[in-house]
Image (cartoon, rainbow, N blue to C red):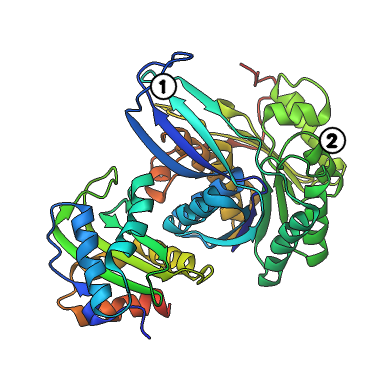
Amino acid sequence: MIVTLTPNPSVDRTVSITDLQRGEVHRATAARIDPGGKGVNISRALNAHHARTLAVLPTGGPQGHLLAELLAEAGIAVALVPINGSTRANVALVEPDGTTTKINEPGPVLSASELQALIAGAEATLTQHPSWLVGSGSLPPGVDDDFYAALVGRCRAAGVSVAIDSSGPSLRLAVQAGPDLIKPNLEELEELVGRSLNTLGEVLDAGVDLVAHGVGTVVVSMGGRGALLVSPTQVAHAVAPVSSPRSTVGAGDALLAGYLYATGSGSTPLEALCTGVTWGAAAVSLPGSRMPTPDDVAGVSVSMTKEPDLTLVVKN
Amino acid sequence: MALITENLVVLNLDCPDRHAATRVLAQALADEGRVTDLDGFLADVRKREEQMPTGLPGGIGIPHARSTHVTEPTLAFGRATQGIDWGAEDGPATLIFLIAAPEGGGDDHLKILAALARRLMRTEFRESLMNAPDATTVVDVVTREVVNP
């Protein structure tokens, strides 16, 4: 089983309109609602592959209730931590040419006791010996930056592998706590190491630095340039072409889900990298934040090398 | 009490739309004493359906509600060979589960819903429901796969 923790989940409303004009009334041509949040996406991708997963998340208010129902409808087991505030609702306005305007709420403020309950809710799952616990996504307003670092500490104490996918100060502090895996994208990695990364060689050096400081494995997602894995003993670069990209939303989450799924089912890290890149590429071919199914990933071909071209330019 | 019984299985659910189909299944719940106020319960189901229909890929509809008009967690099943539009992108629903849970039942409602939805992702489970010759077989399949997996 893989446990996901999403500290700031959302109900995502996607509204299709013909033409966005400030100050005007718009008539929606279509609308849909989806459960949102990076950890939630990982659980959705795992569930789509019939893998056991448990999503831990705070929920409050009518949107929280709706979020819990949407996850249940998708067949996802949840551990809900009730909060007084209301779960956020995010809105995406989509025009016919695909232009998307997003409006994200900051999310509810969690009290100190609610935060404790959230960490405790995640910690309670450790007795079930999950193959991974993954903390993913932004923190709600007012939460201390050491939230993920504390999570890493609890998992390590319990001997459960822990992955963190976050950004900014919360990722920096989590890294110092020695997680088994992090999956930054290029931008997040640049912020973490404090320098610009233009070539695969520079990305590799950044990964080596992090591993030297106690991170088990670094998987850097680089969009169309695939992903680079760096661990104390291995380096590999994998890429999968996407013939007709539709939406990059959630592709990084699918990549991480694929990696965790594969290692949790006995694959080597390099095989897992390929699985992750395959899932990520499949997600890019799907609309919105839809997560790939086994059918979706079946058509993706991936290439992997242990001797990557370090001169490859990774920035657009 | 059992989550589903033979009296809560409708093998020929041929209705013009999802609201009519939901009413037929809810009536079965009321006849069994699982729902105390049919219209009140239907209004609770409709609140969720109006946000977005509960159709799933593979010809599934899973209308559901936690409601003060429900006496205990219950499933009603309907098979609509003609298909009923339930809002899923890949086509109409042929297998419909109406899930009723009492207000204040905690997360039970979500647990049943998630367990059922997970099973419904499996082709074999869907086919065994499609091919079930009678209500007893449906009850057996659902009990084996969802209630006591």
Q: Position of residue B24 (x, y in %)?
A: 19, 65
Question: Residue B147: which numbered mark, if any?
Answer: none
Q: Position of residue A170 (x, y in %)?
A: 79, 40
In this view, the residue in front, A49 or A30, is: A30
**Placement of the N terminus of chain A among the 4 image quadrants:** bottom right
In this view, the residue in front, A255 or A98, is: A98
Q: Which residue is at a point 78% across and 44% down the rendered structure image?
A: A143
**Placement of the C terminus of chain A among the 4 image quadrants:** top right
**Horizontal side, residue A98 vs residue A52: left or right:** left
Tell me: residue B68, above or below residue B62.
Answer: below
**Horizontal side, residue A97 vs residue A276: left or right:** left
Q: Which residue is at a point 23% across and 67% down the rendered structure image?
A: B25
Using a 10 Å C-alpha cutoff, classify the residue at mark 1 as few (fewer than 14 neighbours), some (14 to 19) or many (20 or more): few
Q: Which residue is at a point 71% across and 57% down the rendered structure image?
A: A118
**Horizontal side, residue A232 vs residue B116: left or right:** right
From the image, state whether disc 2 or disc 1 is nearer to you: 1
**Residue corresponding to mark 2:** A209
Question: Residue A98: which numbered mark, if any?
Answer: 1
Whichever of callouts 2 and 1 sits on the residue coming sooner in the sequence is 1
